[in-house]
Amino acid sequence: MFMQEDSEVELGQNPLEKSILALKTNRTVQIISVLVGLLLISIPAYSMYSKSQIPEDEYQREIEYLIDYDYGSITWNSNSNLELNDEQVFSLLLTNDDFPEEAKEMNIVSVSAYIEVLDFNEDNEETNGLGCAVDSGEDAPDSASLIFSSPNYQTELLETQSMTGDYIFLLEEPEFMTFPFITGYTINEIEEMYESDDEDIIGEYNFEIRGMVEAGDSTLECDREDPSVTISYSIELEWLEINVIEWNGDSMWF
Ligand SMILES: [Ca+2]
Ligand SMILES: [Ca+2]
């Protein structure tokens, strides 16, 4: 009876079982062993991270910056004497490969197109008939339309009797809550945000200019005809370069 009890006790106190039991029941030891385990895992991970993962410019996120902009435009295609008949369409199908050489080196952020109807003040209407000297009637204004599209699937449609133009933006300009101050980013990251993405730049640019000719009403003995409309157009590429300036806190402007 006594021996039996003794052996049961001895079984329960096997040194290995004892230590496992201690680990299982002692929460302090349990927590410490978990912490030691985490530390052992994280030490090599941390040293790897600090050696190769933290870039040298990480400190720049703490600094406030201002942006200095430099920009301009480059004429891509133009014609100041494009003569079209009524409903005649002049088409230009271009790609980024057709950019002027200097534009290929630049950060192109938008494409703009401009048309002007040159018949606006001096129409080329022809009059024919005996009564023209008495009453020749009046010119009717001609007009032109322009439709243009860019690789980022944006399209603009313009129509005018005088002059008009518009832009398609190829860069989505970043917005900062703290503008004009920018903080939380490295200089490289800020510069990249102001650079157009290839997918917005690379591809087809279409331009279609349509002439719309209108002759004035003929009078009783004077016929009016309008053979054409003359248009001036220009296609421009706008470039942007930025300079990220560290703000030292005592600018004159603020
Ligand atoms: Ca006319
Ligand atoms: Ca005309």
Image (tube, grey):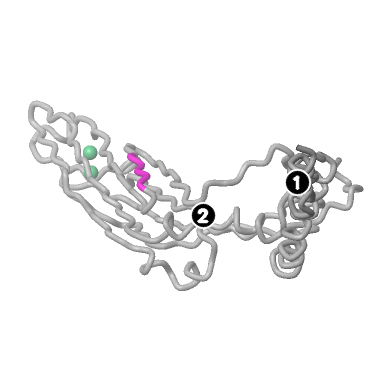
Near-viewer residue (8 or 96) = 8
Amino acid under label 2?
Answer: Val
Q: State whether the magenta stretch is mostly helix, strand or loop.
A: strand
Magenta part of the chain = 153-157
Which x, y percent locates residue 112? 44, 50
| Figure quadrant of the N terminus | top right
Quarter of the image where one finds residue 245: bottom right
**Residue 182 shows in this picture:** no
Q: Is residue 156 magenta?
A: yes
Residue type indicated by callout 1: Ser
Residue position marked by numbered label 2 in the rendering: 109
**Mark number, residue 7:** 1
Q: Which quarter of the rendered picture does the C terminus lie within? A: top right
Vertical position of residue 134 compared to residue 79: above or below:
above
Q: Quadrant of ligand 2?
A: top left
Of callouts 2 and 1, the N-terminal one: 1
Q: How many marks?
A: 2
The residue sitting at the top extreme is 220
